[in-house]
Amino acid sequence: MNIHEYQAKEILKDFGAPVSNGFVIFNPQELVKNLNKLKSEKLVVKAQIHAGGRGKAGGVKLVGRPEIFSEVKKMFGKVLVTHQTGPQGKKVKKVYIQEAYDIEKEFYLSCLVDRESSKIAFISSTEGGVDIESVAKNNPEKILTTKIDLKESLTHEDIQKIIKIFSLDINQKKDAENLVNAMFNTLISKDASLIEINPLVITKQKKLICLDAKMNF
Ligand code: ADP
Ligand code: MG
């Protein structure tokens, strides 16, 4: 089973992770009464379907406030075809409205249960926002895997190993520690098999934020 991006982000936020601000709507009429919850001038309209690759398929749109109503209406009518939906595509029935962030860097961070070794593996890469499979194939040196024994909680050293590749400043490190702990604690307490953040970004304002999240059980 997997859940939608907005549900994965809600769980991670409850566990203390820095995630992007937003709200989900189930029809275009719900937009008006929620819009003042978000402060940014630009917004992102994101289709909530059970498949990745939405960006390339037209399921992620950056818009200004005046255009958002027409963009949301269009999004609800779309059938998205991505590399994960099959040729018939998936109809958009839920739309997530997000604050738009000025992105400086896009990273990749995931954790999963490695059944073979009974360990938890964290995978970090500075090449985020793209298919991690193609990074693994073309730039394997840009992927770091950190295996952790099953235990109650992570140590400071575990976390430093996982995030080292990102070369973060002090504030970003604090946020990244909260994120790694949130991912680890979610994986264990919710019995998830995979949690993937792609992209994890550094904004031009130097903030570290999860822009996309995926969770499998
Ligand atoms: P998918 O993985 O299904 O294509 P993402 O949520 O990863 O969907 O979005 C694709 C890309 O759109 C991201 O890599 C990022 O560059 C951009 N993006 C997504 N959300 C935002 C946001 N809130 N602000 C700015 N850019 C975003
Ligand atoms: Mg993504």
Image (cartoon, rainbow, N blue to C red):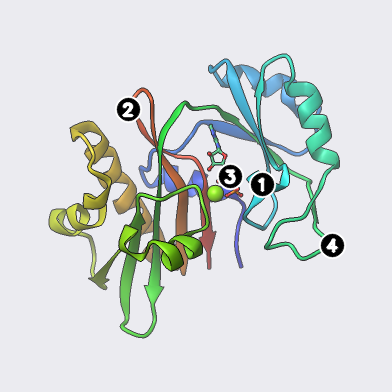
Amino acid at circle 3: Tyr
Check residue 124 in the rendering and tell me which mark sits there, or answer none: none
Amino acid at circle 2: Lys
Q: Which residue is mark 3?
A: 6
Q: Is mark 1 within 8 Å of ligand 1?
A: yes
Label 1 or label 2, whichever lies nearer to me, is: 1
Check residue 206 in the rendering and tell me which mark sits there, or answer none: 2
Mark 4 is surrounded, within 10 Å at the Cα level, by few (under 14), some (14 to 19) or many (20 or more) other residues, namely: few
Disc on the earlier residue, 2 or 4: 4
Secondary structure under badge 1? Answer: helix
Whole-angstrom CA distance, mark 1 to mark 2, is: 26 Å
Answer yes or no: is residue 69 visible. yes
Whole-angstrom CA distance, mark 2 to mark 3, is: 23 Å
Amino acid at circle 4: Gln
Whole-angstrom CA distance, mark 1 to mark 3, is: 19 Å
Q: Is mark 3 within 8 Å of ligand 1?
A: no
Q: Which residue is mark 4?
A: 88
Amino acid at circle 1: Lys
Answer yes or no: is residue 192 visible. no
**From the viewer's perspective, is residue 150 above or below residue 49?**
below
Query: Residue 139 placed where, x, y %?
Result: 38, 61
Whole-angstrom CA distance, mark 2 to mark 4, is: 40 Å
Mark 2 is surrounded, within 10 Å at the Cα level, by few (under 14), some (14 to 19) or many (20 or more) other residues, namely: some
Q: Which residue is mark 1?
A: 56
Disc on the earlier residue, 2 or 3: 3
Residue at (45, 68) in percent of width and height? 137
